[in-house]
Image: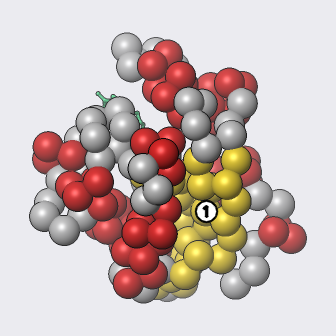
Amino acid sequence: ALERTFSIIKPDATRRNLTGQVNARLEAAGLRIVAQKRVLLSDREAKEFYAVHAERPFYNDLVSFMTSGPVVLQVLEGDGAIAKNRETMGATNPADAADGTIRKDFAESIEANSVHGSDSPENAAIEIAYFFAGSEITG
Ligand code: CMP
């Protein structure tokens, strides 16, 4: 079924000028970028977005990292977009990521892992709505 998922190109990737290379891989996988904006996240936005991880030991570092430079916020659309995007990204830890995935080829560490992607339809809807108005998304 046609789905939408939420994606972030993280500061480690924008810093190394990898936005185009990441987007080329998303598009080659059959994902359509139906909304996209490059922003500097506020401390509050990063904290709220990752609130589910608030009790994890890496939370404060993660918030600092995600506000350390520009990110590219995206809505991706495609058949089975959530799973397709997760396959294209590879495992959270680049050391575990399969060959040919974005994280295997670009990520610097488990924290600076170049991209974020929603893990479920429920979270995709929440994450998209957190950063995008309906009028900003054009299928
Ligand atoms: P992401 O998929 O955006 O979800 C949470 C983020 O926390 C993860 O990618 C990493 O950037 C970061 N992170 C840092 N350390 C860990 C860890 N040990 N386990 C999971 N995520 C981590």
Q: Residues within 10 Å of mark 1 (few under 14, many from 20)?
A: many
Instruction: Determine the residue positioned at 68% across, 37% down.
Output: 41
Residue 83: x %, y % from top left: 37, 68
Q: Which residue is mark 1?
A: 74
| Snapshot quadrant of residue 58 | top left
Q: Residue at x 49, y 62 (%)?
A: 19
> Percent x, y for residue 123?
56, 51
Please name whichever residue, 96 or 2, is drawn nearer the observer in this view of the structure. Answer: 96
User: Which quadrant of the rendered structure holds the C terminus?
Assistant: bottom right
* Picture mark count: 1
| Residue depicted at x 61% and y 62% | 74
Left or right of residue 42: residue 111:
left
For residue 22, side relative to residue 44 (left or right): left
Image: 16 above or below 112: below
Q: Position of residue 50 (x, y in %)?
A: 55, 32
In this rendering, the answer to whether 23 lies above or below 120 is: below
Coordinates of residue 111 in the picture (x, y in percent):
35, 33
Q: Quadrant of ligand 1?
A: top left
Observer-nearest of 36 and 4 = 36
Tag 1 secondary structure: strand
Residue type highlighted by circle 1? Gln
How is the rendered protein coloured? secondary structure
Left/right placement of residue 78 relative to residue 39 reads: left
Q: Is residue 65 above or below residue 72?
A: above
On the image, which quarter does residue 112 sit in? top left
Q: As rendered, which of 13 and 111 lies closer to the eye?
A: 13
Q: Is residue 71 visible?
A: yes
